[in-house]
Image: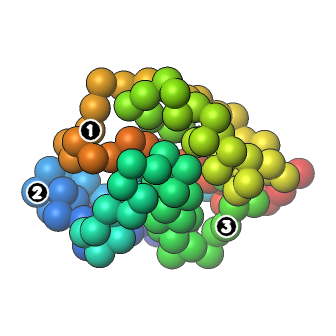
């Protein structure tokens, strides 16, 4: 499927995007959806063993995808955080608050059994609204 005026995709260098067939982010109308994003930069895991650093890196990657649409943190309306350990809730929550406290998006935090890379402790998703603000 190609991009249209109502739908646009952003791809990154993630090997899974081509292998599985997904985009890092998709804008559809006034919404931008950022796929599950891990704390990898150029294929290198950042913050191995540190959930705070992993959360900041993963959110940074997701926000970089939003930037491709001219959006920033203030456009975020929903976040999802997936953790492999409940013990990491405070560290990941601290990273989230530092980035989104002024925006206060709807947020979900869930503990999962694992990710495709077993060193990853945190994966995040972000949704943004690029329409007129009220």
Residue under the image location 51 percent in, 70 percent down:
64
Horizontal side, residue 86 vs residue 91: left or right: left
Quarter of the rendering containing residue 48: bottom left
Q: Looking at the image, is 110 positioned above or below residue 94? A: above
**Circle 1 residue:** 115
* Residue 83, position as x, y percentages in the image: 44, 34
Give the position of the N terminus as an image quadrant.
Answer: bottom left
Depth check, mark 3 against mark 1: the one in front is: 1
Residue at mark 3 to residue at mark 1: CA–CA distance: 27 Å
The residue positioned farthest toward the left in the image shown? 19
Residue 81 seen by the camera: yes
Quarter of the rendering containing residue 16: bottom left
Label 1: which secondary element: loop
**Circle 3 residue:** 72
Label 3: which secondary element: loop
**Disc number placed over residue 19 in the picture, else none:** 2
Q: Are marks 1 and 2 in contact (CB under 8 Å)?
A: no
């Amino acid at each position: 499927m190609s991009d249209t005026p109502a739908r646009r995709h952003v791809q990154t260098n993630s090997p899974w995007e081509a292998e599985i067939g997904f985009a890092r982010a998709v804008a559809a109308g006034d919404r931008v959806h950022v796929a599950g994003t891990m704390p990898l930069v150029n294929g290198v895991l950042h913050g191995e063993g540190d959930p705070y650093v992993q959360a900041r890196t993963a959110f940074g990657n997701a926000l970089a995808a939003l930037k491709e649409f001219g959006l920033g943190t203030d456009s975020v309306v929903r976040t999802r955080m997936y953790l492999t350990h409940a013990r990491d809730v405070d560290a990941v929550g601290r990273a989230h608050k530092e980035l989104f406290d002024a925006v206060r998006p709807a947020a979900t935090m869930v503990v999962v059994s694992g990710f495709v890379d077993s060193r990853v402790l945190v994966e995040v998703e972000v949704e943004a609204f690029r329409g007129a603000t009220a």
